[in-house]
Image: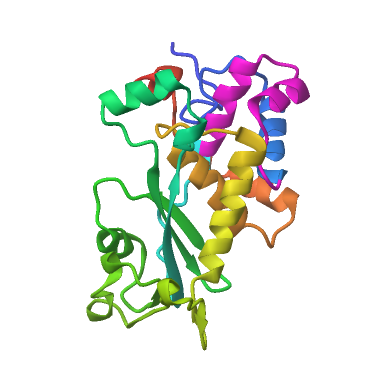
Amino acid sequence: MSRFSVTVGTMMEGSKLPLSKWFTAMYLITAHKKGISSCQLARDLGIGQKAAWFVLHRVRAMLSQNGIVLDGRVEVDECYVGGKWANMSKKKRAIMAENRIDNKVPVMGLVEREGWAKMTIIGKYTFKEVVRQHVSTNAYINTDEHLGYWGLNQEFADHAMVNHGRGEYKVEDVHTNTVEGLFGLFKRMVFGIYHQVSPKHLQRYCDEMVYRYNSRKVKDVERFINTLKQTEGRLTYKQLTGK
């Protein structure tokens, strides 16, 4: 007869940590306004740093909100996440130059005015392809003057731009200030708490930031309860650390 527990099929499956520590971790991770490091979480839970790091990534995996489609007036912009070339060691710069590795990862932010937000790694997609994936065709889109956004007016209800190159940052109600504010919060999280983020795990950090942003108007307890409803799935240590 096979053994069964309530954690089967959830992110907590196969874990040796008691549920009390898992629930505490979920509360702490989602309640901290800029996130919490694995070292601090390890001290709070009384576990090792390696175990806390694994818990952090499994909780982040619960926070993905891929099913959301943005509508209304949506601001779209991009940023580039990665360490500064000047701050890298000579050895690391040589390795990256030899293998032609770009130290910056392009990330697109999409935010409804007074509503939901999303952040996603652009990867192999064009700017317009990413917008199509996450925004309703009924939306009114605001961007900067980047050529990658040209032509969106033919696919969506409207597309208005501000030209940052000419010093334009707001023309009547057209601007990208909200999404730039989202990027500011993300960078404060990375610089202040995590210090550096690998491209491999970057999307989970984006999901963590967006989940916190989208639940900014609810109390910590309600956010914790909503997180408990999203525990389905599995992320093994092999999957997390593999190539």
Work out whether residue 88 or residue 45 is closer to the camera in this orientation and state it: 88
| 113 vs 91: above or below | below
Q: Quadrant of residue 114?
A: bottom right
Q: Quadrant of the N terminus?
A: top left
Give the residue displayed 54% in from the left and 33% down from the top.
196
Which percent across, then down, holds residue 226? Answer: 61, 49
Q: Residue at x 46, y 77 (%)?
A: 73
Q: Position of residue 33 (x, y in %)?
A: 70, 48
Residue 69 drawn above or below residue 150: above
For the record, the magenta segment spans: 33-60
Residue farthest to the bottom? 172
In the image, taking residue 134 as reference, residue 195 lies left or right, namely right
Would you place residue 1 above or below residue 61 in this image?
above
Farthest top residue in view: 1
- The structure residue drawn at horizontal position 35% and vertical position 22%, both measured from the top left corner, is 94
Q: Report which quarter residue 18 is drawn in.
A: top right
On the image, the x and y values in percent for residue 103 come to 39, 36
140 vs 116: above or below: below
Determine the main secondary structure of the stretch shown in magenta: helix
Image coords of residue 38 (percent x, y):
64, 26
Residue 65: tell me if it is visible. yes
Q: How is the image coloured?
A: rainbow
Q: Is residue 95 left or right of residue 48?
A: left
Res. 228 in view = no
